[in-house]
Image (tube, coloured by chain):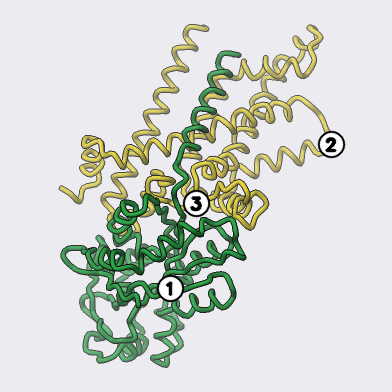
Chain colours: A yellow, B green
Amino acid sequence: MENNAFYVALSLLLNFDAALFQIVALSLQVSLLAVLIAAVLGFPLGAAVALWRFPGRGGMIVVLNALMGLPPVVAGLMVYLLLSRAGPLGEWGLLFTPGAMVLAQVVLVLPILAALSRQKVEELLGEYREQFVSLGMSRSRMMPTLLWDARFALLTILLAGFGRASAEVGAVMMVGGNIEGVTRVMTTSIVLETGKGNLPLALGLGIVLLTLVMLINAGVYLVGELTRRRVG
Amino acid sequence: MKKTLNLLLAGITSMGLAFGAYADDYITLASTTSTENSGLFASILPKFEDATGIEVRVVAVGTGQAFEIARRGDADSLLVHDTVGEKRFVENGYASERADVMYNDFVVIGPASDPANISEAQTAAEAFAAIANAEAPFASRGDDSGTNRAELRLWKNAGVDPEGDWYRELGSGMGPTLNTAAAMDAYVMSDRATWVAFGNRQNLALLFEGDKVLFNQYGSLLLSEEKHPHLKHEMASKWHNWLLSEEGQQAIADFRVDGQQLFFPNAK
């Protein structure tokens, strides 16, 4: 029985293991905060690129799209060099803290949110352009309207960003250091337990992580459906 | 819309506060995976914390990366196992003092059928030569860790230049290397602590041990105040001295896995 991952996952959850709870809570805190920050920066950025015409716009779109595939370990390495004492932001003393993990995940998630929202807003702009022009709206007035109208699509984009953040291990391992009780999250625990040869426990943790992501997605889906129905 | 934004901001601020609320009485220790994965730190750190009130946060990486973290000033203290590299670290001015803390030993693991017949070998050099002669698969860490450096010295001792299809450099930590060796029935050198605590042995068995050259010394380093004045030197030297004290040495000796002592204190 102890070698069955589902059994391990279930007993982890049912026993409400304090260490596991802390790890899950930190994973959620780090990834949700990273996605929030990335959204506050990324959605207006995406909308702005969709709305304004400026030199280098095409290049910027290509770069944003390409950065969606940025390998987490590269993002981690960049943030590591930035936050290391020998690096430009070393004074902040952020390395090996949850703050560093948030920063690394923002770097990973921001391009996804910006690139996908840019595409969605541009689509909507095509539909609404004539109305906007007849109303004599400025571009900066169009931005909130378009973002608000794209809110259901943005929610899905947000989930894609959260998926990327909660699933990656390369960046948080490098800048967090997988310190027990401080920077250990779900994915780094899975790497650690795999390394110790505790494969059923590692897979059990993986099942817990998947369940969690599933619940969040279900919650967002329900909220989306309910509001959609109310709005009509 | 505005309400949502306010909520967002409030959420971000409160989370930020939660992150900032960690205690200041801690040091960051760069150390090796063997000390962390075997459970040694989980056993001795609470005793140090009780005695001094200082929390020790362990970043467990290969010895090569641990040196690099300390060189850049990202850790307050260093506990690794590569005596040659440690002495060079002191000579280069990155550390002001190095001391022996404890030892354990390396063991050679392989498929229980032992195709290269190394369990008959008298010395580690014989065992390594036998593996090379049989061209039996050997999984090397290949990650510039303390274990990897020791393994390369042992091939040299055996007069073998490890090359060919049978010699596989994995570039991973001790645990992942053992997992891979188990999957491909390869020989592998491991520190005893990681092997004893390892849970996925499959066909692997301990085949060779006991030669003096397999001795694995761990050292603690006090990092240089001149190179990195921002580090928590006072707390770090308390940790360093505690490891060498009777109390710290006893804590290391008391650590057992399945009744077996894995690290032997030998501070002078």
- Residue A129 lies in quadrant: top right
Q: Is residue A89 left or right of residue A214?
A: right
Q: Are marks 3 and 1 on the same chain?
A: no
Residue at x 38%, y 45% (from the top left corner): A181
Q: Amino acid at mark 2?
A: Pro
Of the pair A7 and B17, the residue shown nearer to us: B17
In the image, is B164 to the left or to the right of A127?
A: left
Crowd class of label 2 (few under 14; some 14 to 19; many from 20; radius 10 Å): few
| CB within 8 Å, label 2 to label 3 | no
Q: Residue at x 55, y 30 (%)?
A: A36
* Image disc number at residue A55: 2
Closer to us: A131 or B43: B43
Query: Which one is in front in this view, the residue at disc 2 or the one at disc 1?
Result: 1
Q: Are marks 3 and 1 in contact (CB under 8 Å)?
A: no
User: Label 3 sits on what residue type?
Assistant: Gly
Q: Could you say where residue B260 lies in the image, as x and y percent from the top left? A: 19, 68
Q: Are marks 2 and 3 on the same chain?
A: yes
Which quadrant would the N terminus of chain B be assigned to in this image? Answer: top right
Question: Counting other residues with Cα less than 10 Å from the Cα at mark 3, is it few (<14), some (14-19), or many (20 or more)?
Answer: some
N-term mark: 2 or 3: 2
Q: Which residue is mark 3?
A: A170
Q: Give residue B198's quadrant in the image.
A: bottom left
Residue labelled with disc 1 = B146
Residue at (61%, 19%) from the top-left corner? A150
